[in-house]
Image: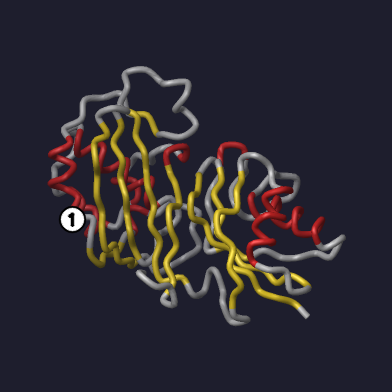
Amino acid sequence: MTQRYRVTIAYDGTDFAGFQVQPNQRTVQGTLEKALTKMSKGAYIQVYGSGRTDAGVHATGQVVHFDYPGQLPAISMLRALNSLLPLDMEVVDSQLADDDFHARFLTVGKRYMYRVDLGHYTNPFKRRYTGHYPYPIDVERIKAGLPDVMGTHDYTSFAASGGVIKDKVRTIYDATVVFNESENELVFEFYGNGFLYNMVRILVGTLLEIGNGRRDVHDFLRLYEVKDRQQARSTAPASGLYLKKVYYETDENN
């Protein structure tokens, strides 16, 4: 008899080759499965994630599920996994889940955060956890362009090549930017029903060009129409991106 667990994890993505298992690569999924296999004394336990994160991308609220033999209490699962995981990963929540819960297929939304360091030079203590943009920025221009990011649009211009999903229509419910003066950082957040391959990083790259005056404030409206990835140009570095939260219909205070 097995019990399904819903587990929320945080990780520093710097030294991972992304979430999904890859041959001869250190991945988030592979690291979790290795720990669970050790706990189960050699029985392979497959981990299913809410979605993939690329190499270098971080998470504070990635959700996974797996079936584990026995009836281990949720808090015991949290403690046992954390005792086996490396220091760049942590289980932050563990719950018993219904047998039909699926971390990926039942997702109704995700929230991403992106941090941009605006310092003139690369800060050695931030380089793993922020993107870097050392050029002049007008935050008010970015704020004026952000409403154009929201709504339901065809985001073909903001999807990196290599993605396999043909339907590029997504809905972004909320998009914000805050200037953190003490850290000299811009902090973006995007909440939507789904995101395409590298979509958040491309959105940030486009917004930074708006803030720098290299694009019209409302250039998003043109980019939706042309459906041309080359015209969106830049992709912000993976180091500044965080999967902050995953949403499910069954959650309270969704």
- Identify the coloring: secondary structure
Residue type at the position of mark 1: Asp
Q: In this view, does 78 lie to the left or right of 217?
A: right
Image coordinates of residue 225 in percent, x first then y, are 22, 59
Regarding mark 1 in the picture, which secondary structure is present there? Answer: helix
Q: Nearer the viewer, residue 92 or 149?
A: 92
Q: Is residue 195 left or right of residue 12?
A: left
Which quarter of the figure is the N terminus placed in? bottom right
Query: Where is 34 relative to 133, above or below?
Result: below
**Residue at 41% from the left image edge and 21% from the top image edge:** 122
**Residue at 41% from the left image edge and 34% from the top image edge:** 130
Q: Which residue lies furthest to the right in this view?
A: 41
Image coordinates of residue 10 in percent, x first then y, are 54, 49
**Residue at 70% from the left image edge and 50% from the top image edge:** 31
Badge 1, how many Cα within 10 Å: few under 14, some, many 20+?
Answer: some
**Residue at 63% from the left image edge and 50% from the top image edge:** 28
Q: Which of 23 and 85 is in front in this view?
A: 85
Query: Where is 214 relative to 203, above or below?
Result: above
Q: Is residue 25 left or right of residue 192?
A: right
Image coordinates of residue 100 in percent, x first then y, are 59, 82
Q: In this view, does 81 lie to the left or right of 90?
A: right
| Residue to which mark 1 is pinned | 148
The image shows a total of numbered marks equal to 1
Which quarter of the figure is the C terminus placed in? bottom left
Image coordinates of residue 86 in percent, x first then y, are 68, 42
Q: Residue furthest top?
A: 121
Q: Which of the 4 image quarters holds residue 167?
A: bottom left
Query: Where is 12 relative to 250, above or below?
Result: above
